[in-house]
């Protein structure tokens, strides 16, 4: 696994090139395109690790997502928690994975070019309802930027 990561590791120049690639959204199974905000805020997420019930990503704070004070906008943090928090509790084969409830605590600001470590884990599932926990940290300092709880409902595909 370490050898594969080493081979796939991008240089800073390659990473900048990848970030400039235009994102062309694909509709989901219902034909719904992602929102403009989802397209913009999710660019640059790198998935580091995926296991059943667990996802770990890194995200470098870009200038396009800063608020008036020069901090990562809270809306962008909310979107990161929503999207990354969905991954470990996502139901494959579902038509809709719908966020039902989110609770987020903002603890510290993230500045431009800060690299964030986002970890999400599933807390449980009962029927179509699942819940997870997400922590957003400054990768360099370990400081917690935000903590969130996320729940969603999955409507399975009709088997007819």
Image (spheres, grey):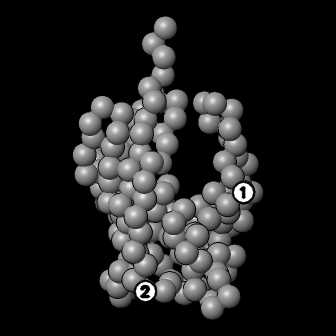
Task: Please identify the quarter of the rendering in which residue 134 is found.
Answer: bottom left
Task: Specify whether 109 is left or right of 37.
Answer: left
Question: Mark 2, residues whose alpha carbon is within 10 Å: few (<14), some, or many (≥20)?
Answer: some
Q: Say which residue appears at 62% left-offset and 65% top-offset.
A: 41
- What residue does disc 1 label? 36
Foreground: 40 or 130? 130
User: In this orientation, does residue 5 appear?
Assistant: no
Task: Please identify the quarter of the rendering in which residue 125 is found.
Answer: top left
- Above or below 61: residue 108: below
User: In this orientation, does residue 146 appear?
Assistant: yes
Q: Which mark is residue 63?
A: none
- Above or below 125: residue 35: below
Query: Mark 1–mark 2 contact, CB under 8 Å?
Result: no
Q: Quadrant of the N terminus?
A: bottom left
Cα separation between marks 1 and 2: 26 Å
- Above or below 16: residue 153: above
Kindly state the secondary structure of the residue where label 2 is placed: loop
Residue 100 is situated, as x and y percent measured from the top left of the image, at 45, 48
Q: First in sequence: mark 1 or mark 2? A: 1
Q: Say which residue appears at 70% left-offset and 43% top-offset.
A: 33
- Above or below 159: residue 16: below
As drawn, which residue projects farthest toward the top?
160
Task: Specify whether 59 is left or right of 32.
Answer: left
Residue 12 is situated, as x and y percent measured from the top left of the image, at 57, 75
Task: Specify whether 75 is left or right of 99.
Answer: right
Q: Say which residue appears at 55% left-offset and 75% top-offset.
A: 74
- What residue does disc 2 label? 108
Question: Mark 1, residues whose alpha carbon is within 10 Å: few (<14), some, or many (≥20)?
Answer: few
Kindly state the secondary structure of the residue where label 1 is placed: helix
Task: Please identify the quarter of the rendering in which residue 91 is found.
Answer: top left
Task: Specify whether 112 is left or right of 88.
Answer: right
């Amino acid at each position: 696994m370490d050898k594969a990561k080493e081979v796939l590791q991008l240089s800073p120049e390659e990473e900048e090139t990848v970030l400039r690639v235009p994102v062309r959204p694909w509709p989901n199974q219902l034909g719904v395109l992602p929102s403009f905000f989802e397209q913009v805020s999710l660019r640059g997420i790198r998935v580091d690790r995926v296991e059943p019930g667990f996802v770990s990503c890194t995200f470098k704070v870009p200038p396009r997502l800063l608020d008036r004070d020069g901090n990562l906008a809270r809306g962008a943090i909310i979107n990161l928690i929503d999207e990354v928090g969905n991954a470990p509790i996502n139901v494959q084969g579902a038509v809709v994975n719908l966020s039902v409830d989110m609770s987020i605590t903002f603890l510290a600001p993230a500045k431009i070019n800060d690299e964030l470590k986002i970890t999400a884990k599933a807390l449980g599932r009962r029927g179509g309802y699942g819940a997870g926990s997400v922590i957003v940290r400054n990768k360099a300092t370990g400081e917690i930027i935000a903590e969130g709880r996320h729940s969603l409902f999955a409507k399975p595909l009709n088997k007819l």
